[in-house]
Image (spheres, rainbow, N blue to C red):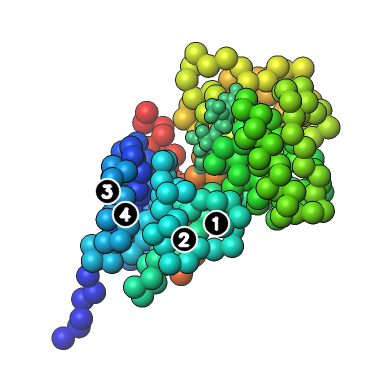
Amino acid sequence: MEKISPRKIYGVLGFPAKHSLSPLMHNAAFKTLKINARYKIFEAEPKELKNFICSLSENHIFGLNVTVPYKEKVIPFLDKISDEARLIGAVNTIKLRGDKLEGFNTDGEGFIRHLRKDLRFNPNAKSIALIGAGGAARAISVYLAKAKAKAITIYDIDKSKAQGLVKHLKANFNKIRFEVAHSVAGLKAKEAALLINATPRGMKEKDPEIIDNKFLPKNLLVYDLIYNPAQTKLLKLAKAQGCRTSNGLGMLLYQGAASFELWTGKRAPIGVMRKALNKHLALI
Ligand code: NAP
């Protein structure tokens, strides 16, 4: 008699996490590749975190995405973490291998894959202006440095965060110029090829603009990590200046694809995953 293997469970863990779009793309991918698996949303309170992570195996959970506020907090409960996740200081993907838990970070990889594959932008030898020095900025800046950017200038409303990130990057990538900008003007966006917003500013309609249009030259690629709304004030402003623009949906897609590949060992069906995200976003 043919042995039927039990359905594997994957999911996203956060607090809150119910708004996550990840189940849409992963379940579409499992269906297309005929993988007997289901991707769910898990919300755990901080006091439940350790127990949740340590019981993955007994609950048949073979892989997790981790989101706010647990990307750093899960690290002590893992058996091993990748070099990239260690450098970023955060884990967004957990894989159960045998009875061991391995941690990875696919946020930066997702960003770079989107830049290269869809936007045809190669960060090599480019100057980059980055707004924000939080978790997402850490992941992105590590991958931009790995891709051999020429210079990365970072501005954060909290100057100590920008200083901390620049110090960390300098200690790990000695051939790249890293600078702290003390204001938006100090980002020197006119000399950059890519400007990135890695802050939540722009998610709310009433949010003020993050940068003045006088800092946005035509040849700049402006990338906002926010994908809802699809067109932030920053992207509208940049488009009006004649800049190329992108929101963060592609980063979400490709970080999900990278997690899927780590879990399944199969190439992620990008087209199917993209379609699932777009279909949902067209409805809201
Ligand atoms: P975070 O850890 O809170 O970091 C954001 C940083 O930006 C904080 O240091 C914050 O300072 C700073 N900041 C806020 N407003 C600013 C302003 N006007 N100018 C300069 N700096 C400012 O957040 P995160 O996790 O890195 O996420 C950042 C954004 O990226 C969020 O919108 C998130 O949804 C998005 N994201 C998208 C993807 C994707 O796949 N597309 C993935 C990850 C994150 P304070 O803490 O002092 O406010």
Report if the CB atoms under discs 2 and 1 are less than 8 Å apart. yes
Q: CA distance from mark 3 to mark 4?
A: 6 Å
SS assignment at label 3: helix
Within 8 Å of ligand 1, the CB of disc 2? no
Residue for point 68% across, 20% down: 211
Residue for point 71% across, 44% down: 167
How many numbered dots are placed on residues in this image?
A: 4
Q: Is residue 40 visible?
A: yes
Task: Point out the frontmost of discs 1 and 4.
Answer: 4
- Furthest-bottom residue in view? 1
- Judge the density around disc 4: few (<14), some (14-19), many (≥20) Cα neighbours within 10 Å: some
Q: Which residue is mark 2?
A: 103
Report if the CB atoms under discs 4 and 2 are less than 8 Å apart. no
Q: CA distance from mark 2 to mark 1?
A: 7 Å
Residue for point 42% across, 41% down: 68
Q: Looking at numbered disc 3 in the image, what kind of residue is underneath it?
A: Glu
Please state, as top left, top right, bottom left or bottom right, where the C terminus lies in the image: top left
Q: Quadrant of ligand 1?
A: top right
- From the viewer's perspective, tell me whether residue 86 is left or right of residue 44: right
Q: Earlier in the sequence, mark 2 or mark 1?
A: 1
Q: Nearer the viewer, residue 283 or 210?
A: 210
Q: Is residue 24 visible?
A: no
Q: CA distance from mark 4 to mark 2?
A: 15 Å
Within 8 Å of ligand 1, the CB of disc 4? no
